[in-house]
Image (cartoon, rainbow, N blue to C red):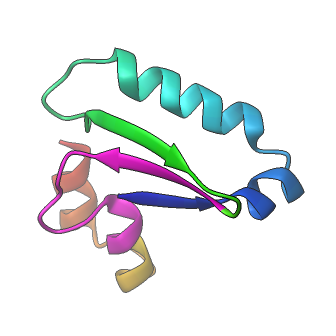
Amino acid sequence: MKLQSKYQIIKNAQEGHLFNEISLMSTLKHPLILQLQSIAQDNRMVYLYLDYMKHGDLMKVLNLHKQLSKELAQFYAA
């Protein structure tokens, strides 16, 4: 599940990006692109329900390592 704060989306003028992401993820069918299963929202958050990723996404890896080694970069680029 991907959570996005409505406050942050509006504050950073990211509404268009969110709509594009939803449109692309619900349209594209590829084994390396997560499938968007459902969308929900409440007063504060937008919830994107995606296919399960056992080890998280690339952003999680980048936050953990700060900078990828050449080997890790090649792995994720492949």
Q: Is residue 53 above or below residue 24?
A: below
Q: Is residue 34 above or below residue 57?
A: above
Quarter occupied by the C terminus: top left
**Magenta span has 18?**
no
Q: Where is residue 45 in the image (x, y as percent from the top left)?
A: 62, 60
Give the residue displayed 67% in from the left and 36% down from the top. 17
Q: Position of residue 15 (x, y in %)?
A: 75, 38
Give the residue displayed 43% in from the left and 47% down from the top. 48
In the rendered structure, the answer to whether residue 31 lies left or right of residue 41 reads left
Q: Where is residue 2 in the image (x, y as percent from the top left)?
A: 43, 57
**Magenta span has 58?**
yes
Give the residue displayed 75% in from the left and 53% down from the top. 9
In the rendered structure, the answer to whether residue 13 lies left or right of residue 27 reads right
Q: Is residue 36 above or below residue 59?
A: above
Query: Which residues lie in the magenta part?
Result: 45-61
**Image-quadrant location for residue 1:** bottom left
Q: In front: 77, or 60?
A: 60
